[in-house]
Image (tube, rainbow, N blue to C red):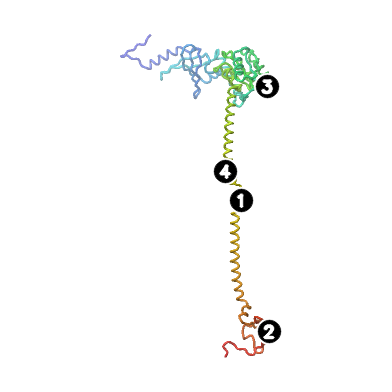
Amino acid sequence: MPLESSPDNPQPLRRIAHLVRGWIERLGPVWVEAQLIEINRRSGRTIFLTLRDKLAEVSVSVTISATTLDSAGPLAEGATVVARIKPAYFEQSGRFSFYCDAITPVGEGRLLARLEQTKRLLQVEGLFDAARKRPLPFLPRVVGVITGPDSAAERDVVENARRRWPAVQMLLRHTLVQGPQAAEQIMAALGQLDRQPDVDVIVITRGGGSLEDLLPFSDEGLIRAVSACGTPVVSAIGHESDNPILDLVADYRASTPTDAAKRVVPDAAEELARVRQARQRMAHSVANLVGREQELLNGLRTRPVLSDPTASFAVRRDQLTSLSDRGRRAISSRLDRESTAVQHHLARVRAMSPKATLERGYAILVAPDGHALGSVDQVGPGDELLAHLVDGQLLVAVREVRARGDA
Protein backbone atom coordinates (compact mmCIF):
# COMPACT_ATOMS: atom_id res chain seq x y z
CA MET A 1 0.00 0.00 0.00
CA PRO A 2 1.41 3.43 -0.89
CA LEU A 3 2.08 5.62 2.09
CA GLU A 4 -0.32 8.52 2.25
CA SER A 5 1.05 11.98 2.90
CA SER A 6 0.29 15.60 2.04
CA PRO A 7 1.58 19.06 2.92
CA ASP A 8 -1.07 19.19 5.63
CA ASN A 9 -0.39 15.62 6.81
CA PRO A 10 3.38 14.93 6.35
CA GLN A 11 5.03 11.73 7.53
CA PRO A 12 7.87 11.81 10.09
CA LEU A 13 11.30 11.39 8.48
CA ARG A 14 12.24 8.67 10.97
CA ARG A 15 9.30 6.59 9.79
CA ILE A 16 10.34 6.91 6.16
CA ALA A 17 13.93 5.95 7.00
CA HIS A 18 12.64 2.97 9.00
CA LEU A 19 10.39 1.82 6.15
CA VAL A 20 13.22 2.16 3.60
CA ARG A 21 15.45 0.06 5.83
CA GLY A 22 12.76 -2.61 6.08
CA TRP A 23 12.25 -2.71 2.31
CA ILE A 24 16.00 -3.02 1.67
CA GLU A 25 16.62 -5.66 4.32
CA ARG A 26 13.81 -7.85 2.91
CA LEU A 27 16.00 -8.36 -0.17
CA GLY A 28 18.48 -10.41 1.89
CA PRO A 29 21.93 -11.59 0.75
CA VAL A 30 22.45 -12.31 -2.92
CA TRP A 31 25.26 -13.86 -4.98
CA VAL A 32 26.59 -11.66 -7.78
CA GLU A 33 29.28 -12.03 -10.44
CA ALA A 34 31.39 -8.95 -11.08
CA GLN A 35 34.88 -7.70 -11.82
CA LEU A 36 37.05 -6.60 -8.90
CA ILE A 37 38.22 -3.10 -9.84
CA GLU A 38 39.82 -1.76 -6.68
CA ILE A 39 40.96 -2.99 -3.26
CA ASN A 40 41.26 -0.18 -0.71
CA ARG A 41 42.91 -1.31 2.53
CA ARG A 42 42.44 1.41 5.11
CA SER A 43 43.40 1.35 8.75
CA GLY A 44 41.47 -1.19 10.78
CA ARG A 45 39.98 -4.53 9.79
CA THR A 46 37.47 -3.19 7.26
CA ILE A 47 38.41 -3.22 3.57
CA PHE A 48 36.57 -1.41 0.78
CA LEU A 49 36.12 -3.12 -2.59
CA THR A 50 34.83 -1.69 -5.85
CA LEU A 51 32.88 -4.19 -7.96
CA ARG A 52 31.79 -3.49 -11.53
CA ASP A 53 29.41 -5.33 -13.80
CA LYS A 54 31.24 -7.07 -16.64
CA LEU A 55 28.83 -5.74 -19.31
CA ALA A 56 27.25 -2.55 -17.98
CA GLU A 57 29.07 0.46 -16.60
CA VAL A 58 27.67 -0.14 -13.14
CA SER A 59 29.97 -0.20 -10.12
CA VAL A 60 29.27 -0.34 -6.38
CA SER A 61 31.36 -0.01 -3.24
CA VAL A 62 31.36 -3.02 -0.92
CA THR A 63 32.76 -3.40 2.59
CA ILE A 64 34.38 -6.68 3.61
CA SER A 65 36.37 -7.86 6.60
CA ALA A 66 40.08 -8.58 6.20
CA THR A 67 39.56 -12.15 7.40
CA THR A 68 36.92 -12.86 4.74
CA LEU A 69 39.07 -11.35 1.97
CA ASP A 70 42.23 -13.18 3.01
CA SER A 71 40.39 -16.51 3.20
CA ALA A 72 39.58 -16.20 -0.52
CA GLY A 73 43.30 -16.35 -1.35
CA PRO A 74 45.30 -13.74 -3.23
CA LEU A 75 42.97 -11.53 -5.24
CA ALA A 76 44.29 -9.10 -7.82
CA GLU A 77 42.54 -6.09 -9.25
CA GLY A 78 40.86 -6.99 -12.52
CA ALA A 79 39.92 -10.51 -11.42
CA THR A 80 36.40 -11.87 -11.94
CA VAL A 81 34.80 -12.88 -8.65
CA VAL A 82 31.56 -14.28 -7.25
CA ALA A 83 30.57 -12.48 -4.07
CA ARG A 84 27.68 -12.75 -1.62
CA ILE A 85 26.57 -9.24 -0.77
CA LYS A 86 23.82 -7.92 1.44
CA PRO A 87 22.40 -4.40 1.03
CA ALA A 88 22.20 -2.29 4.15
CA TYR A 89 20.62 1.06 4.95
CA PHE A 90 21.61 3.21 7.93
CA GLU A 91 18.67 5.21 9.25
CA GLN A 92 20.69 7.83 11.12
CA SER A 93 22.81 8.88 8.12
CA GLY A 94 20.56 7.77 5.29
CA ARG A 95 23.54 5.96 3.71
CA PHE A 96 23.05 2.91 1.51
CA SER A 97 25.84 0.35 1.16
CA PHE A 98 26.65 -3.31 0.51
CA TYR A 99 28.37 -5.73 2.86
CA CYS A 100 30.16 -8.82 1.55
CA ASP A 101 30.54 -11.93 3.73
CA ALA A 102 31.89 -14.35 1.07
CA ILE A 103 33.95 -13.93 -2.08
CA THR A 104 35.77 -16.29 -4.43
CA PRO A 105 37.53 -15.86 -7.77
CA VAL A 106 36.14 -17.58 -10.89
CA GLY A 107 37.39 -18.05 -14.44
CA GLU A 108 40.33 -15.75 -15.12
CA GLY A 109 39.94 -14.45 -11.62
CA ARG A 110 40.75 -17.89 -10.24
CA LEU A 111 43.79 -18.09 -12.49
CA LEU A 112 44.91 -14.61 -11.46
CA ALA A 113 44.54 -15.53 -7.82
CA ARG A 114 46.62 -18.66 -8.30
CA LEU A 115 49.29 -16.72 -10.20
CA GLU A 116 49.32 -14.05 -7.52
CA GLN A 117 49.87 -16.70 -4.86
CA THR A 118 52.77 -18.22 -6.83
CA LYS A 119 54.22 -14.77 -7.41
CA ARG A 120 54.16 -13.95 -3.70
CA LEU A 121 55.80 -17.27 -2.80
CA LEU A 122 58.65 -16.74 -5.26
CA GLN A 123 59.04 -13.10 -4.24
CA VAL A 124 59.48 -14.10 -0.60
CA GLU A 125 62.30 -16.44 -1.69
CA GLY A 126 64.05 -13.47 -3.33
CA LEU A 127 63.90 -14.73 -6.93
CA PHE A 128 62.84 -11.29 -8.20
CA ASP A 129 65.50 -9.26 -6.37
CA ALA A 130 67.29 -6.68 -8.50
CA ALA A 131 70.63 -7.87 -7.09
CA ARG A 132 70.16 -11.19 -8.93
CA LYS A 133 69.81 -9.51 -12.32
CA ARG A 134 72.84 -10.01 -14.56
CA PRO A 135 73.91 -7.48 -17.20
CA LEU A 136 73.48 -8.47 -20.81
CA PRO A 137 76.64 -8.71 -22.95
CA PHE A 138 77.31 -5.84 -25.32
CA LEU A 139 77.96 -8.09 -28.34
CA PRO A 140 77.10 -11.76 -27.70
CA ARG A 141 78.92 -14.44 -29.65
CA VAL A 142 75.76 -16.57 -30.01
CA VAL A 143 72.16 -15.66 -29.12
CA GLY A 144 69.98 -18.59 -28.08
CA VAL A 145 66.29 -18.24 -28.94
CA ILE A 146 63.49 -20.39 -27.50
CA THR A 147 60.22 -19.93 -29.39
CA GLY A 148 57.47 -21.70 -31.29
CA PRO A 149 58.30 -23.08 -34.75
CA ASP A 150 57.67 -20.67 -37.66
CA SER A 151 56.16 -18.11 -35.29
CA ALA A 152 55.88 -14.38 -35.79
CA ALA A 153 57.88 -13.89 -32.61
CA GLU A 154 60.78 -15.91 -34.09
CA ARG A 155 60.76 -13.82 -37.25
CA ASP A 156 60.67 -10.58 -35.26
CA VAL A 157 63.65 -11.56 -33.13
CA VAL A 158 65.79 -13.09 -35.88
CA GLU A 159 65.11 -10.53 -38.62
CA ASN A 160 65.48 -7.49 -36.39
CA ALA A 161 68.64 -8.85 -34.78
CA ARG A 162 70.27 -9.57 -38.18
CA ARG A 163 69.12 -6.22 -39.51
CA ARG A 164 70.88 -4.51 -36.62
CA TRP A 165 74.00 -6.71 -36.62
CA PRO A 166 74.25 -8.86 -39.79
CA ALA A 167 77.01 -11.09 -38.36
CA VAL A 168 75.01 -12.18 -35.31
CA GLN A 169 74.73 -15.95 -34.80
CA MET A 170 71.34 -17.29 -33.70
CA LEU A 171 70.84 -20.73 -32.15
CA LEU A 172 67.13 -21.62 -32.32
CA ARG A 173 65.27 -24.09 -30.12
CA HIS A 174 61.64 -24.73 -31.14
CA THR A 175 59.20 -25.75 -28.42
CA LEU A 176 55.51 -25.61 -27.62
CA VAL A 177 54.58 -22.18 -26.29
CA GLN A 178 51.16 -23.05 -24.85
CA GLY A 179 49.47 -26.06 -23.43
CA PRO A 180 50.35 -28.53 -20.64
CA GLN A 181 53.67 -29.67 -22.18
CA ALA A 182 54.98 -26.21 -23.05
CA ALA A 183 56.69 -25.43 -19.75
CA GLU A 184 58.53 -28.78 -19.71
CA GLN A 185 59.82 -28.33 -23.28
CA ILE A 186 60.91 -24.75 -22.60
CA MET A 187 62.86 -25.88 -19.50
CA ALA A 188 64.58 -28.61 -21.54
CA ALA A 189 65.56 -26.14 -24.28
CA LEU A 190 66.77 -23.68 -21.65
CA GLY A 191 69.03 -26.33 -20.12
CA GLN A 192 70.49 -27.22 -23.54
CA LEU A 193 71.32 -23.60 -24.39
CA ASP A 194 72.70 -22.91 -20.92
CA ARG A 195 75.17 -25.77 -21.36
CA GLN A 196 76.46 -24.31 -24.64
CA PRO A 197 79.67 -22.41 -23.71
CA ASP A 198 79.45 -19.97 -26.63
CA VAL A 199 75.83 -18.91 -25.94
CA ASP A 200 76.04 -15.54 -24.17
CA VAL A 201 72.34 -14.69 -23.86
CA ILE A 202 69.04 -16.59 -24.16
CA VAL A 203 65.78 -15.08 -25.42
CA ILE A 204 62.44 -16.75 -24.52
CA THR A 205 59.73 -15.33 -26.75
CA ARG A 206 56.24 -15.79 -28.13
CA GLY A 207 53.44 -13.58 -29.38
CA GLY A 208 50.49 -12.33 -27.39
CA GLY A 209 47.61 -14.47 -26.21
CA SER A 210 44.98 -15.01 -23.57
CA LEU A 211 45.77 -15.55 -19.92
CA GLU A 212 45.41 -19.32 -20.37
CA ASP A 213 47.75 -19.30 -23.39
CA LEU A 214 50.49 -17.57 -21.40
CA LEU A 215 50.21 -19.82 -18.33
CA PRO A 216 53.36 -21.87 -19.22
CA PHE A 217 55.46 -18.72 -18.79
CA SER A 218 54.22 -18.42 -15.20
CA ASP A 219 54.96 -22.06 -14.38
CA GLU A 220 56.85 -22.34 -11.07
CA GLY A 221 59.24 -24.93 -12.46
CA LEU A 222 60.20 -22.70 -15.40
CA ILE A 223 60.63 -19.69 -13.10
CA ARG A 224 63.02 -21.62 -10.87
CA ALA A 225 64.92 -22.94 -13.90
CA VAL A 226 65.43 -19.40 -15.24
CA SER A 227 66.56 -18.24 -11.79
CA ALA A 228 69.16 -21.04 -11.67
CA CYS A 229 70.33 -20.47 -15.26
CA GLY A 230 73.96 -19.36 -15.58
CA THR A 231 73.33 -17.47 -18.84
CA PRO A 232 71.46 -14.13 -18.85
CA VAL A 233 67.84 -14.58 -19.92
CA VAL A 234 65.61 -12.10 -21.77
CA SER A 235 61.83 -12.47 -21.50
CA ALA A 236 59.86 -11.29 -24.55
CA ILE A 237 56.36 -12.66 -24.04
CA GLY A 238 53.38 -11.11 -25.79
CA HIS A 239 52.82 -7.39 -25.73
CA GLU A 240 53.32 -4.60 -23.24
CA SER A 241 50.12 -5.45 -21.36
CA ASP A 242 51.08 -9.13 -20.89
CA ASN A 243 52.91 -9.76 -17.63
CA PRO A 244 53.73 -13.44 -16.96
CA ILE A 245 55.88 -14.22 -13.93
CA LEU A 246 58.79 -14.96 -16.27
CA ASP A 247 59.12 -11.18 -16.77
CA LEU A 248 59.92 -10.75 -13.08
CA VAL A 249 62.65 -13.38 -12.82
CA ALA A 250 64.34 -12.72 -16.20
CA ASP A 251 67.45 -10.56 -16.28
CA TYR A 252 65.73 -8.24 -18.76
CA ARG A 253 62.07 -7.89 -19.64
CA ALA A 254 61.40 -6.87 -23.26
CA SER A 255 58.02 -5.40 -24.06
CA THR A 256 57.87 -7.21 -27.44
CA PRO A 257 59.99 -9.68 -29.45
CA THR A 258 61.23 -6.75 -31.54
CA ASP A 259 62.32 -4.96 -28.38
CA ALA A 260 64.23 -8.09 -27.35
CA ALA A 261 66.16 -8.09 -30.65
CA LYS A 262 67.07 -4.44 -30.12
CA ARG A 263 68.29 -5.18 -26.62
CA VAL A 264 70.46 -8.26 -27.18
CA VAL A 265 72.52 -6.96 -30.13
CA PRO A 266 73.73 -3.43 -30.89
CA ASP A 267 72.89 -1.52 -34.05
CA ALA A 268 75.87 -1.65 -36.43
CA ALA A 269 75.00 1.72 -38.01
CA GLU A 270 74.67 3.40 -34.61
CA GLU A 271 77.91 1.86 -33.36
CA LEU A 272 79.71 2.93 -36.55
CA ALA A 273 78.42 6.47 -36.04
CA ARG A 274 79.64 6.37 -32.44
CA VAL A 275 83.06 5.17 -33.64
CA ARG A 276 83.23 8.06 -36.12
CA GLN A 277 82.26 10.52 -33.39
CA ALA A 278 84.82 9.03 -31.02
CA ARG A 279 87.55 9.27 -33.68
CA GLN A 280 86.62 12.87 -34.37
CA ARG A 281 86.72 13.69 -30.65
CA MET A 282 90.07 11.94 -30.28
CA ALA A 283 91.51 13.74 -33.31
CA HIS A 284 90.25 17.05 -31.93
CA SER A 285 91.68 16.28 -28.50
CA VAL A 286 95.07 15.27 -29.96
CA ALA A 287 95.16 18.40 -32.12
CA ASN A 288 94.38 20.57 -29.10
CA LEU A 289 97.05 18.80 -27.05
CA VAL A 290 99.67 19.22 -29.78
CA GLY A 291 98.68 22.87 -30.15
CA ARG A 292 99.05 23.52 -26.43
CA GLU A 293 102.40 21.77 -26.30
CA GLN A 294 103.59 23.71 -29.37
CA GLU A 295 102.61 26.99 -27.70
CA LEU A 296 104.48 25.93 -24.58
CA LEU A 297 107.54 25.00 -26.64
CA ASN A 298 107.42 28.32 -28.49
CA GLY A 299 107.22 30.12 -25.17
CA LEU A 300 110.23 28.23 -23.90
CA ARG A 301 112.20 28.95 -27.06
CA THR A 302 111.61 32.70 -26.71
CA ARG A 303 113.10 32.80 -23.23
CA PRO A 304 116.55 34.54 -23.06
CA VAL A 305 118.22 31.52 -21.55
CA LEU A 306 117.36 29.50 -24.65
CA SER A 307 117.86 32.24 -27.26
CA ASP A 308 121.37 33.04 -25.86
CA PRO A 309 122.55 30.34 -23.44
CA THR A 310 125.81 32.25 -22.65
CA ALA A 311 123.97 35.39 -21.59
CA SER A 312 123.47 34.01 -18.12
CA PHE A 313 127.19 33.31 -17.82
CA ALA A 314 128.00 36.95 -18.68
CA VAL A 315 125.51 38.16 -16.10
CA ARG A 316 126.96 35.84 -13.50
CA ARG A 317 130.51 36.83 -14.49
CA ASP A 318 129.68 40.51 -13.99
CA GLN A 319 128.09 39.68 -10.66
CA LEU A 320 131.14 37.63 -9.64
CA THR A 321 133.54 40.44 -10.68
CA SER A 322 131.49 42.99 -8.77
CA LEU A 323 131.43 40.76 -5.69
CA SER A 324 135.21 40.14 -6.00
CA ASP A 325 135.90 43.89 -6.22
CA ARG A 326 133.68 44.54 -3.24
CA GLY A 327 135.48 41.78 -1.33
CA ARG A 328 138.92 43.17 -2.14
CA ARG A 329 137.87 46.68 -1.19
CA ALA A 330 136.38 45.45 2.02
CA ILE A 331 139.52 43.47 2.92
CA SER A 332 141.81 46.37 1.98
CA SER A 333 139.73 48.79 4.02
CA ARG A 334 139.76 46.40 6.95
CA LEU A 335 143.54 45.95 6.69
CA ASP A 336 144.07 49.70 6.55
CA ARG A 337 141.96 50.21 9.65
CA GLU A 338 143.75 47.43 11.50
CA SER A 339 147.18 48.74 10.39
CA THR A 340 146.34 52.20 11.66
CA ALA A 341 145.18 50.70 14.95
CA VAL A 342 148.42 48.72 15.23
CA GLN A 343 150.47 51.88 14.58
CA HIS A 344 148.55 53.71 17.29
CA HIS A 345 149.08 50.86 19.75
CA LEU A 346 152.75 50.62 18.79
CA ALA A 347 153.25 54.35 19.31
CA ARG A 348 151.62 54.11 22.72
CA VAL A 349 153.77 51.15 23.65
CA ARG A 350 156.91 52.89 22.45
CA ALA A 351 156.00 56.00 24.34
CA MET A 352 155.75 53.96 27.50
CA SER A 353 158.93 51.92 26.79
CA PRO A 354 162.08 52.50 29.05
CA LYS A 355 164.14 52.69 25.90
CA ALA A 356 162.20 55.72 24.78
CA THR A 357 162.91 57.25 28.15
CA LEU A 358 166.63 56.53 27.78
CA GLU A 359 166.61 58.00 24.27
CA ARG A 360 165.34 61.29 25.77
CA GLY A 361 168.57 61.45 27.93
CA TYR A 362 167.35 59.82 31.06
CA ALA A 363 169.17 56.99 32.94
CA ILE A 364 167.87 54.14 35.03
CA LEU A 365 169.64 53.44 38.26
CA VAL A 366 169.73 49.90 39.55
CA ALA A 367 170.74 48.95 43.10
CA PRO A 368 173.24 46.21 43.74
CA ASP A 369 170.34 43.83 44.39
CA GLY A 370 169.10 44.37 40.82
CA HIS A 371 166.03 46.51 41.62
CA ALA A 372 165.51 49.84 39.89
CA LEU A 373 165.65 52.77 42.25
CA GLY A 374 162.56 54.81 42.67
CA SER A 375 163.49 56.86 45.77
CA VAL A 376 166.59 58.44 47.40
CA ASP A 377 165.67 56.65 50.53
CA GLN A 378 166.78 53.39 48.97
CA VAL A 379 170.50 54.33 48.85
CA GLY A 380 173.09 55.91 51.00
CA PRO A 381 176.47 57.55 50.50
CA GLY A 382 179.08 55.17 49.30
CA ASP A 383 176.66 52.79 47.60
CA GLU A 384 177.61 51.70 44.16
CA LEU A 385 174.88 51.86 41.53
CA LEU A 386 174.59 50.74 37.95
CA ALA A 387 173.32 53.43 35.57
CA HIS A 388 171.67 52.31 32.33
CA LEU A 389 171.97 54.75 29.43
CA VAL A 390 170.73 54.50 25.91
CA ASP A 391 174.06 53.41 24.55
CA GLY A 392 175.57 51.53 27.56
CA GLN A 393 175.97 51.23 31.34
CA LEU A 394 177.93 53.20 33.98
CA LEU A 395 179.13 52.07 37.38
CA VAL A 396 178.76 55.03 39.73
CA ALA A 397 179.27 55.61 43.46
CA VAL A 398 177.00 57.73 45.65
CA ARG A 399 178.88 60.55 47.31
CA GLU A 400 175.90 62.30 48.79
CA VAL A 401 172.13 61.80 49.09
CA ARG A 402 169.95 64.90 48.76
CA ALA A 403 166.21 64.62 49.27
CA ARG A 404 163.78 66.97 47.51
CA GLY A 405 163.57 70.15 49.40
CA ASP A 406 167.07 69.87 50.98
CA ALA A 407 169.29 72.93 50.42
Mark 4 or 2, which is nearer the eye? 4
Residue kind at label 2, given as amino acid type: Pro
- Between the residue at mark 4 and the residue at mark 1, the CA separation in whole angstroms equals 18 Å
Residue where numbered disc 3 is placed: 198
Residue 149 vertical placement versus 305 (above, below): above
In the image, residue 89 sits, relative to residue 332, either above or below, namely above
**For marks 4 and 1 on the same chain, the one whose residue lies earlier in the sequence:** 4
Q: Residue furthest left?
A: 8
Q: Secondary structure at mark 3?
A: loop
Tell us which disc is closer to us: 3 or 1: 1
Residue 137 horizontal/vertical position (percent):
63, 24
Circle nearer the N terminus (4, 2): 4
**What label does residue 302 carry, if any?**
4
Looking at marks 2 and 1 on the same chain, the residue that comes earlier in the sequence is marked by 1
Rendering quarter of residue 333: bottom right
Along the polypeptide, which appears first: circle 3 or circle 2? 3
Q: Is residue 130 visible?
A: yes
Name which quarter of the figure residue 128 lies in.
top right
Q: What number is the disc on residue 140? A: none
Residue 401 % position (x, y): 62, 89
Residue contact between numbered discs 3 and 1, judged by CB atoms under 8 Å: no
Q: Amino acid at mark 1?
A: Phe
Counting other residues with Cα less than 10 Å from the Cα at mark 4, is it few (<14), some (14-19), or many (20 or more)?
few
Q: Are marks 4 and 1 in contact (CB under 8 Å)?
A: no
88 and 346: which is toward the camera:
346
In the picture of the structure, the residue carrying the numbered disc 1 is 313
User: What is the spatial separation of the Cα atoms under label 4 and label 3, in whole angstroms?
Assistant: 62 Å
The residue tagged 2 is 368
Q: Position of residue 12 (x, y in %)?
A: 36, 16
Element carrying mark 1: helix
- Give the crowd class for mark 2: few <14, some 14-19, many >=20 residues within 10 Å: few
